[in-house]
Image (cartoon, grey):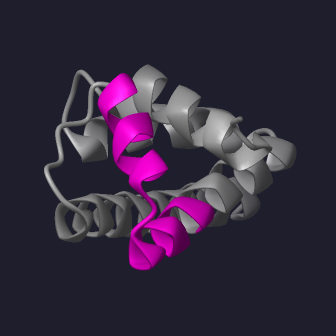
């Protein structure tokens, strides 16, 4: 049975990054999360939980990623993919929220 973070991660992978490069998908995610902090908490929490699950080598994570059309063949690839997703997300999210707070931006 899927947990909340699993459902959230599966949905965000399928909706934002399964069909385009990570950075482009993340830009679409950030468009939503920079305007709605509750989505930032949900999405970031799901990415973090996915990373921890990859480190624990839980086979359900590989299945989840496959269902989301993300091709990874092992836990190292899953971890690398999710860490790249997190890095891109944090970089773009921080830039977007700084720009939103800067009255000259």
The quadrant of the picture occupied by the N terminus is top right
Question: How many numbered marks does the figure carry?
Answer: 0
Any part of residue 34 in sight? no
Residue that sits furthest to the right in the current view? 38
Q: Nearer the viewer, residue 10 or 20?
A: 10
- The relative height of residue 60 versus residue 78 in the rendered view (above or below) is above
Residue 21 screen position, x and y as percent: 19, 37
Query: Is residue 56 shown in magenta?
Result: yes
Residue 6 screen position, x and y as percent: 63, 43
As drawn, is 51 to the left or to the right of 44? left
- The relative height of residue 33 versus residue 80 in the rendered view (above or below) is above
| Residue at the image point whose x is 20% and y is 71% from the top | 76
The quadrant of the picture occupied by the C terminus is bottom right
- The relative height of residue 94 versus residue 20 in the rendered view (above or below) is below
Q: Nearer the viewer, residue 104 or 80?
A: 80
> On the image, which quarter does residue 48 sit in?
bottom right
| Residue at the image point whose x is 63% and y is 53% from the top | 46
| Residue at the image point whose x is 55% and y is 58% from the top | 47
As drawn, is 16 to the left or to the right of 97? left
> On the image, which quarter does residue 45 sit in?
bottom right
Any part of residue 5 in sight? yes
Residue 57 screen position, x and y as percent: 39, 70
Q: Which segment did they paint magenta? A: 49-67
| Residue at the image point whose x is 66% and y is 37% from the top | 8
Q: Nearer the viewer, residue 95 or 45?
A: 45
Q: Report the magenta stretch's main SS.
A: helix
Query: Is residue 105 shown in magenta?
Result: no
Residue 34 screen position, x and y as percent: 68, 47
As drawn, is 70 to the left or to the right of 100? left
């Amino acid at each position: 049975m899927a947990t909340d973070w699993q459902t959230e991660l599966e949905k965000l992978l399928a909706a934002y990054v399964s069909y385009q490069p990570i950075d482009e998908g993340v830009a679409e995610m950030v468009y939503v999360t920079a305007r709605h902090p509750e989505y930032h908490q949900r999405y970031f929490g799901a990415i973090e939980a996915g990373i921890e699950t990859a480190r624990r080598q839980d086979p359900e994570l590989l299945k989840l990623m496959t269902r989301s059309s993300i091709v990874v063949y092992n836990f190292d690839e899953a971890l690398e993919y999710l860490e790249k997703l997190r890095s891109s997300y944090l970089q773009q999210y921080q830039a977007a929220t700084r720009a939103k707070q800067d009255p000259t931006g």
